[in-house]
Image (cartoon, grey):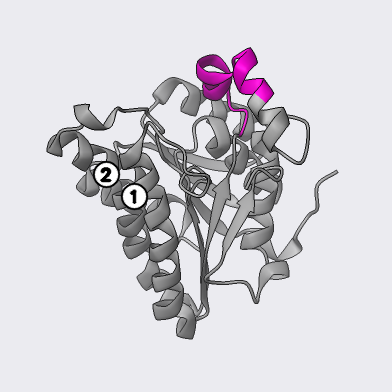
Amino acid sequence: MAAIYSDLAGRVVLVTGGGSGIGEAIVRRFAGQKCRVGFIDIQDDPSRALVKDLTGQGHTVHYEHADLRDIAALRSAIARIAGALGPIEVLVNNAAHDERHATPDVTPEYWDERIAVNLKHQFFAAQAVLPAMQQAGGGVIINFGSISWMIGQGGMAAYTASKSAVLGLTRSLARDYGPYNIRVNAIAPGWIMTQRQIDKWLTPEALKELDARQCLKRKIMPDEVARFAVFLASEEASACTAQHYIVDGGWV
């Protein structure tokens, strides 16, 4: 049984990309902590199904559709969630897309789009919630990176560039907003077995690489990342900020 953090009960949590994969697991875990959870996603069907499931269990969950590459739409979605649930106290910048791309094929437009989907929205989501956190005297921001740049993964230079930049963003925000008791950390997941990863990349050859490179000789699941995100948001992690935590089963 996962830990229950009593200080999280009633807190307003915003998760980007919360409709499926790691984001869905995060939404479920915060709901299980009796948080009021808002999430943003671009996929309506799984997002609405998640809301129906969790509200049917008595949880408070609110979904807003937005393309996070559209900063105006992102800001509007955040404002609607805050209007429905209250000021955001915990922000989880989870949304990303690890689309592969060959370096010779990358155009300036494609590069900008990859930065937008993997990095830019993290800054602007933080910018949108920080004033309320300052006014409240504290808050938590959790940015999602990746181990991909740490292990020198090829075939997606714009993605790895974005994810390495998450660490710089995290440390800068932590420095600027620490005086307001706002903690900012990053999580770098390894190869997490979301349905998308299973469908696209889980080949026999990939499983051999996993077994060779991970210390833990098993698949790492989305809920294992979600449980760590909940811990970081809780007062059990009250002295943790400006850090980059790896959840990868010992790959790096």
Mark pair 1, 2: CA separation: 6 Å
Task: Name the residue located 35 percent from the left edge and 48 percent from the top edge.
Answer: 162
Within the magenta stretch, is there residue 199? yes
x, y percent for residue 175 = 43, 79
Q: Quadrant of residue 29?
A: top right
Say which element carries label 1: helix
Return the x and y of residue 200 as percentages of the image width and height: 50, 17
In magenta segment, residue 241 = no
| Amino acid type at mark 1 | Leu
User: Mark 1 — residue?
Assistant: 119
Q: Quadrant of the N terminus?
A: top right
Write down the quadrant of residue 236 in the picture. Answer: bottom right
- Give coordinates of residue 185: x percent, y percent: 53, 64
Q: Is residue 50 above or below residue 157?
A: above
Identify the residue under disc 2: 116
Q: Nearer the viewer, residue 192 or 65?
A: 192
> Does the CB distance between marks 1 and 2 fall below 8 Å?
yes
Residues drawn in magenta = 192-208
